[in-house]
Amino acid sequence: MKSNMDTIAAISTAMAPSGIGIVRLSGKDAVCIADKIYKTPKKNKKLSEQSTHTIHYGWIKDGDTNIDEVLVMLMRGPHTYTGEDTVEIDCHGGILSVKKVLETAVKHGARPAEPGEFTKRAFLNGRIDLSQAEAVMDVISAKNEYALKSSLGQLKGSVLGRIKEIRDTLIYELAFIESALDDPEHITIDGYGEKLNVVVEEQIEKINRLLSTVDEGKLIHEGIKTVIVGKPNVGKSSILNLLVGEEKAIVTDIAGTTRDVLEENINLQGISLRMLDTAGIRDALDKVEQIGVERAREHAKDADLILYIVDASVPMDKNDEQIIELIKDKKAIVILNKSDLKCVVSIQNIKKEVDAPVLLMSAKENSGLTELQDIIKSLFFKGELIFNDEIYITNIRHKKSLEDARISLKQVKQSIDMKMPEDFFTIDLISAYESLGEITGESMGEDLINEIFSKFCTGK
């Protein structure tokens, strides 16, 4: 049976040829196991006799067989990532050599680590809270500069700090109520409902401020789902190629060339866009093209942003009317493409039909791209993102817990308004306190914790 007391080992670098590969061991027997497989040119030198946070040169050996020439980093708990004794073996980065080093460590007493088990141990040993643990994976998977900055802020405890502040306030009020009910002769609760109402309002406002960042947080981490729509042959695929910076989509003069959805991830000035190039929207007779058009409509419905491409050199028609209807009440940017030709569709024409930013572009001449980037940033992030003190809630689990806490606090206010006895307040105050504790991991069951860490990569 696997135990948190076992000494674990895993490869902590990518399984691909590289200059260096790292095998990490953590647990009470990490140094002892390393002593069995690490040999140095200096006879009788043991890692167990060396100072913590030191690096040593030598070889990993299995008996008399040399496995690899290495540098070994010795770190004793509790001042390590996991809070346990940790040994990191820096070997050559060939896939086979790294695997051989790991196999040797396992052969001499280590257990292969489960996904996320190193970070799980850091959490269980009190080195980090659950929001910081989840931020570890967010740092690894960050797709752009803003996502990385947000994740690093959470890793440093930005979310923990705000949640702890609210929980400390709630536990103080809970303690006061309990004390007053236990000792009514010395602690009065006259007028306490009005005082508590103000305190609860302040905590609800703090939660509201955190929840107000959810939409931007989602876009920062997952990217803006951007769907390109328009009639056939207006230059949708050319615009995609211009944004991506290479020929990803087939471009021809034949209308209806794009039949299916083509997806690409791009980075514009630090913002991730999940670009979807769709089939041209028109009344198609071809069955395959009809399917493509229907998929284009479906993707447009749940898009974060729609880029509506118009051929500025061709008059608009009933197909454009259908597309305009489709993008109503959606965040959209209208791009008048082929502006290098004689334009018969003007910005003024479009403004009469669509309440959205409009700009001239020419995929052929690579013009208008900077203006498009600026418009996207202004639509979603008010032109810029500032990370000095701002916290973005990027985790759906955190959002749900914050919403649950807000509901409980609003129920406290209802109890106050209804002049309920003070012990009724504690029920919902405790519920709010517990909901917020789910974010930091202080109020969670083992099964949910295991599920969260199972999504991590093995070596982290």
Image: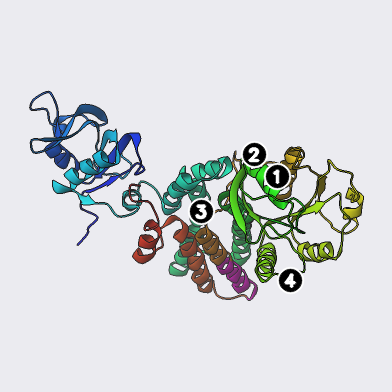
Residue drawn at (46%, 64%), measured in percent from left and top?
Answer: 434
> Mark 3 = which residue?
163
Label 2, label 1: how many angstroms apart (C-alpha)? 9 Å
Camera-nearest residue between 111 and 325: 325
Secondary structure of residue under mark 2? loop
Three-letter amino acid code at the position of disc 3 = Ile
Q: Which residues are magenta?
A: 407-418
Q: Is residue 373 visible?
A: yes
Residue 82 in which image quadrant: top left
Q: Which mark is first along the chain, 2 or 3?
A: 3
- Front tag of 1 and 4: 4
> On the image, which quarter does residue 388 sit in?
top right
90 in the magenta segment = no
Q: Type of residue at label 2?
A: Gln
> In this orientation, which residue lies closer to the viewer: 66 or 414?
66
Q: Mark 2 and 1 residues: CB-CB less than 8 Å, in contact?
A: yes
- At which x and y percent is residue 410? 61, 68
* Type of the residue with mark 1: Lys
Task: Say which quarter of the image contains residue 97.
Answer: top left
- Badge 3: how crowded within 10 Å, few (<14), some, or many (20+)? many
Q: Nearer the viewer, mark 3 or mark 2?
A: 2
Q: Which mark is residue 377?
A: 1
Residue that numbered label 4 is attached to? 285
Rounded to the nearest angstrom, the CA distance separating label 3 from label 2 is 31 Å
Task: Give the residue at the far top of this rendering.
Answer: 42
The secondary structure that dominates the magenta segment is helix
